[in-house]
Image (tube, rainbow, N blue to C red):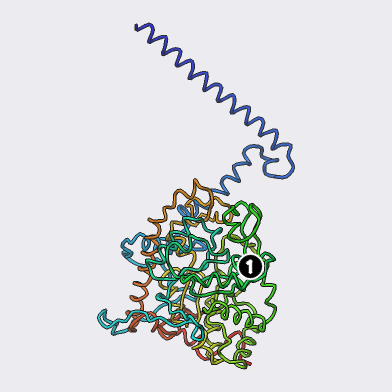
Amino acid sequence: MSNNLMNLGLITLAAVGLLIVLALAAGLVTVAILYLIDRNQSKHSIRRNYPVIGRFRYFFEYMGEFFRQYFFAMDREELPFNRAERSWVYRAAKDLDNTTAFGSTRSLDPTGTVMFMNSAFPTLSDTATHWQPKRLGPHCRHPYEPQSFFNISGMSFGALSKPAVQALSKGAKTAGCWMNTGEGGLSPFHLEGGCDLVFQLGTAKYGARDLAGELSDDKLQALAAHDQIRMFEIKLSQGAKPGKGGILPGDKVTEQIARIRGIPVGHDSISPNRHLDITSNDDLLAMIHRIREVTGKPVGFKCVLGDTDWLVDLFELIRQRGAECAPDFITLDSADGGTGAAPQPLMDYVGLPIKESLPWLVDQLIASGLRDRIRIVASGKLMVPSKVAWALATGADYVVSARGFMFSLGCIQALQCNRNTCPTGVTTHDPQLQRGLVPADKAARVAHYHHQMVYFLEMIAHSCGVPGPSDLERKHVRMVTDSGLSAPLDHFYQNRIPLHTVR
């Protein structure tokens, strides 16, 4: 018996040894083949000069996106969002304690740093007021009074996965905020949560076009028949890619997405860089009037500000024709806004950031006598309480965020949105990766994030001595100047229009 066991052990040991030898031999053969391939190819200099070893460069380059945010970047230095900002959203979404200890890691020295001015007599909780809705579309058959100042910005089904849209829709319903469909059309997943929706009309007019690709009144009427669709937004431009239409890679264009958009399966979905039927301010006002008449609901447009002459001319044209022809709202995006895919030169260098464009737009509307007629929706990296409070104090009526709500879904800023390889299932259509995103669980996190945002906005407002966030003004904010000392925000913007003068 013992001899049999010994023989079995020797055989097993020999087999293991043989497997190791074979594995080593296979490894050596593989390395030899890769060496010959790398040495003789001519496309990659590093691999040609350093065969096999040079291949690790691409691996480390790929993994660097992940290692930087976890091991090397400091809490406040990473872009597009630093660890401190992301951590606040994660804790808020999980409804965890969002206090910190010892002291702030935020430096108050850099020029442009914003600080809120606390009152000697803060607002007591029992005298505080909740946010009051501001009506949009007073001249419409169906005006809209949103129940929240903080809402979900435009993200298309296609750019986002099915479970991500489902979670946002359900979470928005619980939170009482609106959700923008993005330019990819209306999907059943937007509707199933029961939340208020803003239908975005992109340059390709997905979801609202006929077979020839033209805007269809019949499609608009069908969309307006949904009680959940409360407004229509004409997308002129987007902060991350001004002058470029939407980009959806072909490997994300599934049969379902193709059916909703009216495009071929598996082909890149690239929208025109502007609306072909909007070539002037006259055309823009005509389009707004047409959609408003057909749907009976508020209509506005979205843009990132660059050239300002056209807006000055638009406001003058509205003054001549009457306030009834005006857009019901303007969604102002920032040059550092986000997207699923965009050319880097546009993302890095084109457009104005919202810290400059928002004060200008508010002051221009005041000077044109249209401030009470046109509501302002601010967008672009406004995902933490301080930045939302700044936007409201500067003059925005509403604030929308896309990436903040993506973080609430579990996004880890892996920068894989354009590759269909999102590891958290937020921006991929790979079923195996989508499996990680459970809509019911993430919907609760969306609602928690919204609740905490409102709670902390009210806290900032009360600290400044006003009843609520809508009462914040520029005088409540100071900004650090080149001298190292701060000045009130209204010192920079009040009663002056830095980019243009009213005609």
Q: Is residue 386 above or below residue 36?
A: below
Q: Is residue 368 above or below residue 437?
A: below
Q: Nearer the viewer, residue 69 or 359?
A: 359
Q: Position of residue 7 (x, y in %)?
A: 42, 9
Q: Quadrant of the N terminus?
A: top left
Q: Nearer the viewer, residue 22 or 250?
A: 250
On screen, residue 471 versus residue 19, left or right, reads: left
Q: How many marks?
A: 1
On screen, residue 260 versus residue 465, left or right, reads: right
Q: Dot 1: few (<14), some (14–19), or many (≥20) neighbours within 10 Å? A: many
Residue under label 1, please give it. 209
On screen, residue 272 versus residue 62, left or right, reads: right
Q: Position of residue 169 (x, y in %)?
A: 44, 63
Q: What amino acid does circle 1 point to?
A: Arg
Residue 356 is at least partly visible in this image: no
Image point 60% across, 82% down: which residue? 289
On screen, residue 320 versus residue 404, left or right, reads: right
Q: Nearer the viewer, residue 216 or 1?
A: 216
